[in-house]
Amino acid sequence: MDTGDTAWVLASSALVLLMTPGLAFFYGGMVRSKSVLNMLMMNFVTIGIVTLLWVLYGFSVAFGDARSGLWGGLDWAGMKHMTTIETTFNGSEYHIPLLVFAAFQLMFAVITPALVSGAIADRAKFGAWMLFVVLWVSIVYFPVAHWVFDFGGPKGEPGWLAGKGVLDFAGGTAVHVNAGAAGLALALVLGRRIGWKKDPMRPHNLTLVMLGAGLLWFGWFGFNAGSALGANALAGQAFFTTMVATATAMLGWLVVERIRDGHFTSLGAASGAVAGLVAITPACAFVTPVGAVILGLLAGAVCALAVGLKWRLGFDDALDVVGVHLVGGALGAISLGFLSVYAGSKGLLYGGDLTVLGNQVLAVVAVGGYSFVVAYLLGKLIDMTMGFRISREQEVEGVDLFAHAETGYDIHSAGTGSGALVGSISPVTQAHAEAREVNA
């Protein structure tokens, strides 16, 4: 066992866990004040649900002693046959305890369904969301993680996409395309928010958005560089290209925004940075710094344009999960068909052939298509049984009070002048809250 590698992967696991609260703040600032707590809770609750399922059977399905390229099986359910003294994984390639690897991959499993929540902001029942997370990670994320991330070993078969040589260093397909496709499916199932395209639905707290983006950027170094599973040169390459692509994507988004809208906005800067993080995720260990610049600029510009698709096509993706994660993840994965410098899998710009590009397109289509279909069916099933969307009255007043009996901003001020805060709750909402206190 290499103690340095183990220490780096443990630290990276903590960094990736930080990304889920960071995502909660990023999304929470983008919604209206009456929905901020619900958005925070939709993200935080995935930590509890996915951690439990990961121990019971998730890790086994994703990385068990597989006999199939489609799933890892249940031989390791309950984390049995694992000890803290095992030092290798995937054919003695990585000298870290297996439980450390399991902890690192758990954080990926946690944040992936959390990403989906942004597509259905303001209008989902919290209980229905929790049930969806249970079903979706079990049927979609855990098997897809096996497809993409499990390279097999002396006793196990690799995932079918990994076995084909698909390049996805840290989850462009398994995480971002996967979550983006599911977000699109749920946005179609739940339908548009009341007042969509008519009422202003501006972010209520851009300070939270910027804080969340900063936490995501910080945590993403663990996400990408930690995927080297060691403190080595590959981790250094992933770290550096992540920084470069994120910074240039932010600039690419701002340039498009200035040309299109006439302004450089903080929301654009934060969104551009996240778009760069998404796009470089599958490519961070396979491109040069110059390749990272190219990919970052493309990601910022393309995603800035892609977020407008929802207005043209008529689906209410509240927080641009499709435009940033589905489009950005697909762009990053497919770009390796051109920009990869990985030995034996070089892109077209570095003397490779069409094999790499074909594999990357296959991975995007397979993961995105599977996730969309299953998420749509699960969403419809939940909607027909327990109902997935809150009532019209609850949506108008705000999901926070009705789902959680709390509000994000407890402002007890009767004034409505310059001293009243923007986040203050309405008199009707306050009356509902006081009635609940009396009944309690």
Image: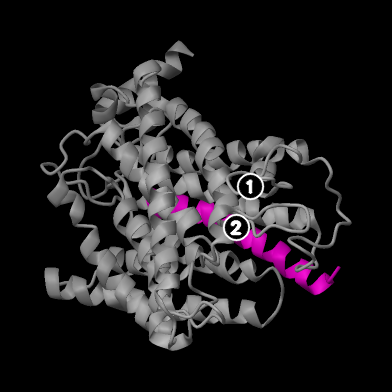
Residue appearing at x 52%, y 50% in the figure: 111
- From what the image shows, is residue 318 above or below residue 7? above
Please tell me whether residue 8 belongs to the stretch shown in magenta. Answer: yes
Q: Is residue 432 or residue 104 the one in the foreground?
A: 104
Whole-percent x and y of residue 129? Answer: 44, 32
Viewer can see residue 208: no
User: Which residue ends up furthest to the top in the rendered image?
Assistant: 439
| Residue beneath disc 1 | 62
Q: Is residue 371 left or right of residue 285?
A: left
Q: Is residue 60 left or right of residue 25?
A: right
Viewer can see residue 371: yes
User: Which residue ends up furthest to the left in the rendered image?
Assistant: 198
Residue 410 image label? none
Whole-percent x and y of residue 365? Answer: 38, 54
Residue 149 image label? 2
- From what the image shows, is residue 297 above or below residue 381? below
Residue range highlighted in magenta: 1-28
Q: Is residue 303 left or right of residue 69?
A: left
Q: Is residue 344 or residue 426 the one in the foreground?
A: 344
Q: Quadrant of residue 328?
A: bottom left
Of pointers 1 and 2, the one earlier in the residue sequence: 1
